[in-house]
Amino acid sequence: MKTLNPFMISGTETLPLIEGGKGVAVSTGLSSGAWAAAGGVGTFSGVNADSFKDDGNILPQTYSGRTRKERHEELVKYAIDGGIAQAQIAHDTRSGAGRLHVNVLWEMGGAERVLHGIMEKCGDMVHGVTCGAGMPYRLAEIATQYGIYYYPIISSARAFRALWKRAYHKCSEYLGGVVYEDPWLAGGHNGLSNSEDPLTPEDPYVRVVALRKVMNEAGLKDVPIVMAGGVWWLDEWEGWLDNPDVGPICFQFGTRPLLTQESEISAQWKKRLLTLDPGDIMLNKFSPTGFYSSAVKNDFIEELAQRSGHQISYSPEPSEAHDTPLGIGARKREVFVTAEDKTLADSWVSKGRTDSLKTPDSTLVYVSSDKAAEIRADQTACMGCLSACQFSNWAENEKGSTGRKADPRSFCIQKTLQNIAHDGKVDQELMFAGHNAYRFAQDPWYKDGFVPTVKELVDRIRTGQ
């Protein structure tokens, strides 16, 4: 393989190997500091990271506020305190080597406040900020304020062009790189647009070359692109190195750092990664963000699929399409459905799906009474972890609401991600993963359950395999 040469990243000469940020207590200071110590760019999460009690134990993120707004304020404080704590750990762990970045999501609740809160305390420890999940127009302005580099995460040349023309051209000095996160290969939330087919992947090379063309037109030919999603062995990407059509290129690894000694995910999570088969990662649209996301198929995803599968449309008044009355709820209030759907609903009720929940799309979803109670409890306990949530209808605006009915086909993302990050059962929680995660089981390096240190992983990546 061609030599992987270091170049300037966030103000210093660094290996073009970047740890991808994974939110809610997964990308910690320990793993990101170790990645930086190995000569790359470590990324810790500023998305509800763990903070600690005086005795060193993790501080549970519990909420006592009576209103969503009060709980939202608690959430923002947890996020800032956690980001500061993880930045300090990462800084101490890297021992002066590499670079450290903080990752935030633009669509998370209180994103700007959290970023300001972390940077006001950690400006001398953090060298860059990566940000995706939405269109972070104000990212450049905030990063420049603290004299750190910014790395927008986009999934198309068109998205970067919009960011550049509207905002980034004013703060180009601190544009450290542009992260191209492939919507068909990356884990977590994916930036598929309405014009793109989730079932028809496009060639990332073609899309990155298109991005480079837009960047060159803007005078950014020396600004690196970070390829994120689907990167496993670098020798599979050798044609991208020293390629004038691609330009300066870095590679981001999000899934592989999960399976390291420094990774603080649970032992059962690591074990599950070693047993995945091709096809075990599913691109779905259950997320309350409204984005597609990539996660391991398990009982959690299966329940969501079944929930949406037990669904019929209805009208509040009789119509030509909906002419059959159906009683719903404890009071059996009458709505109107098709005769065929009435038969379906009666069948579901007889099999234990006794509760019908209304969706924003004028449909009824049938679930068990226990699941209905869980859904309502989770919606009631909302703390505003997203700027706008389809599941709870919270929005970070003056009204505190999206103005739409809460959608019971989704889930509380904060609850399940906190659970899995803190020893929750991996089959019963949301388990994000990139689509190449099945390669842990196929890669001979991980034979017999071998789990490397971060340094061993970085050294291995540098060999091409």
Image: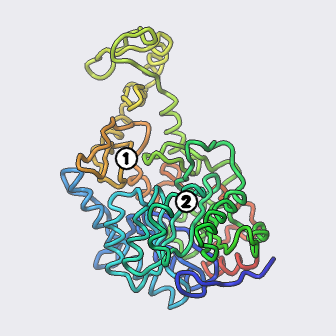
**Residue under the image location 36 percent in, 39 percent down:** 375
Q: Position of residue 5 (x, y in %)?
A: 70, 83
Find residue 245 and report its image quarter: bottom right
Find residue 229 and report its image quarter: bottom right
**Residue that numbered label 2 is attached to:** 161
Q: 346 and 149: which one is in front?
A: 149
Please tell me whether mark 1 sits on a helix, a strand or a loop. Answer: loop
Find residue 46 and report its image quarter: bottom left
Q: Position of residue 67 (x, y in %)?
A: 20, 50
Which residue is farthest right?
1
Apparent side of residue 265 relative to residue 327 in the rendered image (left or right): right
Q: Residues within 10 Å of mark 1 (few under 14, many from 20)?
A: many
**Residue that numbered label 1 is attached to:** 389
Residue 422 visible in this rendered orientation of the protein: no
**Residue under the image location 59 percent in, 72 percent down:** 219
The C terminus, quarter of image: bottom right
